[in-house]
Amino acid sequence: MGSLFGETKLFTSLNAAHKSLVALESLPWPSVRDDAWKYTDLSSLGGSAFSPVSERDLKAKDIPEALKSFLSPTGINIVFYNGSYAGSVSSLSIEGIEIGLLNKAGADNLPLDGFLFQTMNAVCAPFAYVINIHPKKVEDRILHIVHWNDKKLDHKSLFPRIFIRSGARSIVKIVESFFSKDEPTSFINSMTDIQLEDRALVEFVQVFRNGKKSMHVASTRVTQKKESSFRSFQFLDGGNILRNDLKVQLNGEGASASVNGLHQLKGKDHADSHTFIEHVAPNASSDQLYKAILDDASHSVFHGRVYVHKDAQQTNSYQLNKNLLLSRDARVDTKPQLEIFADDVKCSHGAAIGQMDDEELFYLQTRGIAKDEAVRMLVKGFIDDVVSRVKDDTLRSELVKMVG
Amino acid sequence: MLNIKDLYASVEGNQILKGLSLSVKAGEVHAIMGPNGSGKSTLSKVVAGHPQYTVDRGSIDYEMSGGVKSLIGMAPETRAREGIFLAFQYPVEIPGVPTSGFLRASYNAVCRHHGLEEMDPMDFDGFVREKMKILEMDDKYIDRAVNVDFSGGEKKRNEILQMAVLNPRLALLDETDSGLDVDSMKIVAHGVNTLRNKRNAMIVITHYQRLLNYIKPDVVHVLYQGRIVKTAGPELALEVEERGYDWLIK
């Protein structure tokens, strides 16, 4: 028998501040015997104490210079410093976009769906942050949601909770970044919800860069209405444990989703992306490309699930996972999973794991390019191939800066 | 320029070349013909320095900037910078690496080796586009990833484009005609002939005499079981075309 959440040290440390967490104590704590957690061992997380950031901590007064210089001078910034909303460096009013904190009571009204970490987030999040994009709003600037942390987060936990609603025919580009300076030993449980109304277009980049001592369990849930278009890129830049669940529900006819990501791992980094694309409505399409590049003794996991409902006829769905191993000690586990209940669909999936291709290296060398430079070119090529899926030029160049 | 003596070479434990000797001078074009498995491609890989091929015996001497040197053990990139070029039978696809950046990295690596100034991106772009015209290549190739989604013929043209950019002293063309229709072959041959001069040399490896109608060799060799079994003038290629290889190997 596996243990229960209530028996973990993590529970005890959180429960001191969040008495209502008691409701979750009998939920099972994930073990590697659970299919969804087979390759991500959470025993070290369960065995660690991470006290929540206190009310006192939440009042961010002194914004570090390093945080200020991290912010985009041209974009719209919504900034959280060690979990607290940093109003002094955030953009206050943008025409056609409402931004606001939803207090705890609001968050409590949200449906809990039984997933431990998502429910934990709902209970422990001190507030939810809501971004409401009005119908037909077209915003050229990038909307940056910045979760910036530093050493003050050491041995503490964070529960960021973001809701984004993009109104009908609105067009926005959003970067949500989780960034920690000085490698705090921290636990982050984040939840990002994105709703796309009819014909909305959202290009969304998520960056996870919390340092090698961080443990981060991230959930992103996307729902799409008629003819909406969602394009995402998730950049997982290592961590002690980094688990990323992305669920996209294509509920409206003619919706399309392009869902992409890159794991860039070294040392003992562990990153695990679980994607779940649910085709509910007909005539919708989804396209996924996830890549991982691994050095040293790092470990990458990809589980890509595509579920096509009975009524989702004329679905097009493609999924590809490619992994490049730069070291003998690196490890990849990949599992594509297609479940199709409609009969008129086009679906495909594939996975590849390989080392640096000797023939590609030799080809470059025969053109005078030194081996180490050839390796760099091939690594860059491997990355650029997936980064190029970000169609917006400014968004892509933001991403390239972070990846490079 | 190139002097190979009594060369024995292996790949994955199989000895393919068994006592091959070949001497190529500046200004010459040598054709190497031979049935499948005779060692034609192995020869080109060994001269270019493929790491999976090992030289067991013999010598490969090449006249380079510092005088005549042995190629054995020399890194492939050093050989390339010293003017050895291999046009691949199966050009390699490199996803994510744009052709333009690749060509410039290649050209500048050779420049640096010889202490010459690198070409800036603007000048280089013009320089490449001139070369592309010779091969009747569409401008769009330059922005695409190296060989990715290129047809067989486009890949072969891309090889000769690289040759035109690097202007090698010794070019090995490994079955450059395979997979080409007649029109493409004429264009490729025209590209090669444009580059031909008194200071460089070429080794043209081919199954068929067809290509040699367009790239006229000075010397024709027949390779069989890892050795050269016959060397003659251009008429040998015609004779092989007519009679096959049997009369040479029995």
Image (cartoon, rainbow, N blue to C red):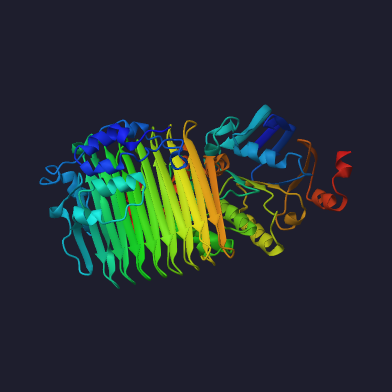
A144 or B185, which is in the foreground? Answer: A144
Q: Is residue A110 left or right of residue B2?
A: left
Q: Nearer the viewer, residue A20 or B134?
A: A20
Q: What number of labels is visible? A: 0
Foreground: B48 or A185?
A185
Which residue appears at 14% of the width and 54% of the height? Answer: A87
At 69% from the left and 58% from the top, the residue drawn is B180
Q: Whole-percent x and y of residue A249?
A: 42, 60
Q: Quadrant of the N terminus of chain A?
A: top left
Q: Quarter-wise, where is residue B58 in the image?
A: top right
Residue B44 x, y percent position in the rendering:
66, 41
| Residue A42 lies in quadrant | top left
Q: Please provide percent x and percent y for residue A83.
A: 20, 46
Residue A72, visible in the rendered structure: no
- Looking at the image, residue B125 lies above or below residue B45: below
User: Is residue B146 placed above or below A182 in the rendered structure?
Assistant: below
**Extreme top residue here?**
B57
- Residue A130 visible from this viewpoint: yes
In the foreground, A61 or A399: A61
Residue A82, percent from left and from top: 20, 44
- Give the residue displayed 36% in from the left and 61% down from the top: A203
